[in-house]
Image (cartoon, rainbow, N blue to C red):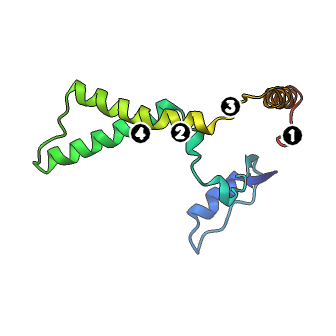
Amino acid sequence: MLRKINLKDLFNRANRTEDTKPVEEETPTEEIPEEPEVQENEKKVDVASLDAGTITRTVVLVLTLVNAVLSITGKDKIAFTDDQVYQVVSAILTVIVPIWTWWENNAFTRNARKAEKYRKDLNKKDATHGSGANE
């Protein structure tokens, strides 16, 4: 739903003092889309849907900010070697990959594979015909 805002009235209200009168001429209006209502569960971060690039950039940003604060306060900066970076990344992947593979729907049985194919077909049908939620 769109609401119409008279730009001249908006300008007059912002610049009006008590002794001035608004301009009474016809002014064009501009349609401004209303912001959609955000439900409570939409405000939460869905960590499962974050891509690796987002996580990497966030970690690098935090490390950079911590290093800058340490530098400004005269403390020793974060110093690490390539081997230490490799060990940390390997440790993180060693924890994340098993959790991810456990979380994913792994279809081992024939019935599970049939159900997976059926689910994918339904998702393709929704994607091509539209689910109706956004229309």
Q: Which residue is mark 4?
A: 58
**Mark 3: which amino acid?**
Asn
- Numbered tag placed on residue 99 in the rendering: 2
- Numbered tag placed on residue 135 in the rendering: 1
Q: Is residue 18 above or below residue 14?
A: below
**Mark 2: which amino acid?**
Ile
Q: Viewer-nearest of labels 1 and 3?
A: 3
Q: Viewer-nearest of labels 2 and 1?
A: 2
The residues bearing labels 4 and 1 have C-alpha atoms spaced at a distance of 34 Å
- On the rendered image, what quadrant is the C terminus found in? top right
Mark positioned earlier in the residue sequence (4 or 3): 4
Mark positioned earlier in the residue sequence (2 or 1): 2
Identity of the residue drawn at 84% across and 27% down: 114
- Numbered tag placed on residue 106 in the rendering: 3
The answer to which of 31 and 123 lies nearer the viewer is 123
Q: Quadrant of residue 93?
A: top left
The residues bearing labels 2 and 4 have C-alpha atoms spaced at a distance of 21 Å
Identity of the residue drawn at 72% across and 52% down: 36
* CB under 8 Å between discs 2 and 3: no
Q: Secondary structure at mark 4?
A: helix
Q: Viewer-nearest of labels 2 and 4?
A: 2
Mark positioned earlier in the residue sequence (1 or 3): 3
User: Residue 128: x percent and y percent?
Assistant: 86, 25
Mark positioned earlier in the residue sequence (4 or 1): 4
Identity of the residue drawn at 68% across and 52% down: 7
* CB under 8 Å between discs 4 and 3: no
